[in-house]
Amino acid sequence: MVKRIALAAVVVVAAAGALSSCVRLVQHRFEDRHEVTGAVVAVRIQNGSGDVTLRSRDGGGGAVEVRRTVHHTRDDRPDGVTHRLEGDTLVLDGCGDRCSVDYHVTVPSEDVKVVGHNDSGDVTVERVAAVEVSIGSGDAVVREIGGAVRLENGSGDVTASDVGGEFTGRIGSGNARLTRMSGPVLVDDSSGDIEVEMAAAQRVHAESGSGNVTVRVPRGSYRVRTDAGSGEEAVEVPHDPNATVELVLRSGSGDLALSAS
């Protein structure tokens, strides 16, 4: 009987401790909206934790709008705003430990470059001039980018569409899906599938350490190099040694598919 009582006491204490821990970790949140006056030609992300969504306004014009949702523990509510203007660059900061901030930013012009790093969280960028962003963990989405895109993602998927300039993507773990690409493509994925659909005859270098690689290109003449490692190859584009555009597909362990339409 004594042992049973002692065991019950231990269970109660453990449960109380767990409940206390949960109470300490309960998240609070608030939302706000701000307008930024002054010309903005670049946005720099340096957020610790949280999602970032940025796009240009339909029709252009107006001020820069920053909407944010802040998640924090009870005693860690941040004071003031977490963005600032450095010259003509809008900086999106984090909010410290035990706190995360989700940004939804609207800029008035497509002539904006987006750069920076997001430690943890998804990043979505639409209708801007150029993108150069790295992510520790989270998905990356870019759409309707007029110029070059450079993405590095430690862990998460990469999705890109309607990119006019050169695309460079490096992924630690996650899939890459690129559609309607008009510029050269270089994508290196340590672990994940790669799918590339080209809108123009441009150089493609797609390599996966472990995953399938699928590339579709417009009809034309290409220099083709493939290496499927331990996988299978389905190559429907003939190799032309005199072609000026090169297609390179490699996978350490996965299948390769190359077609033209």
Image (cartoon, rainbow, N blue to C red):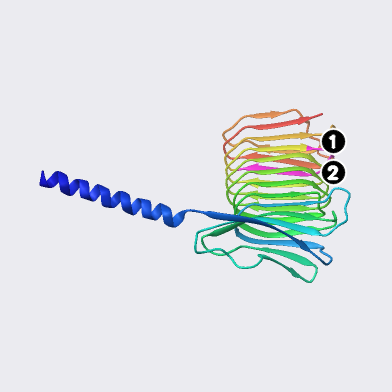
Measured in 3D between alpha carbons, the distance from the residue under mark 2 to the one under mark 1, in whole angstroms, is 8 Å
Judging by the rendered image, the residue that carries numbered circle 2 is: 244
Q: Residue furthest left?
A: 1
Judging by the rendered image, the residue that carries numbered circle 1 is: 221
The answer to the question of whether label 2 and label 1 lie on touching residues, with beta carbons closer than 8 A, is yes
Q: Which amino acid, mark 1?
A: Ser
Tell me the quarter of the image containing the N terminus: top left
**Is residue 47 part of the magenta span, yes or no?**
no
Q: Nearer the viewer, residue 57 or 140?
A: 57
The residue at 85%/48% (across/down) is: 58
Q: Nearer the viewer, residue 93 or 160?
A: 93
* Residue 196 spot, x, y in % from top left: 73, 38
Which span is picked out in magenta? 198-208
For marks 2 and 1 on the same chain, the one whose residue lies earlier in the sequence: 1
Q: Which amino acid, mark 2?
A: Thr
* Residue 249 spot, x, y in % from top left: 69, 39
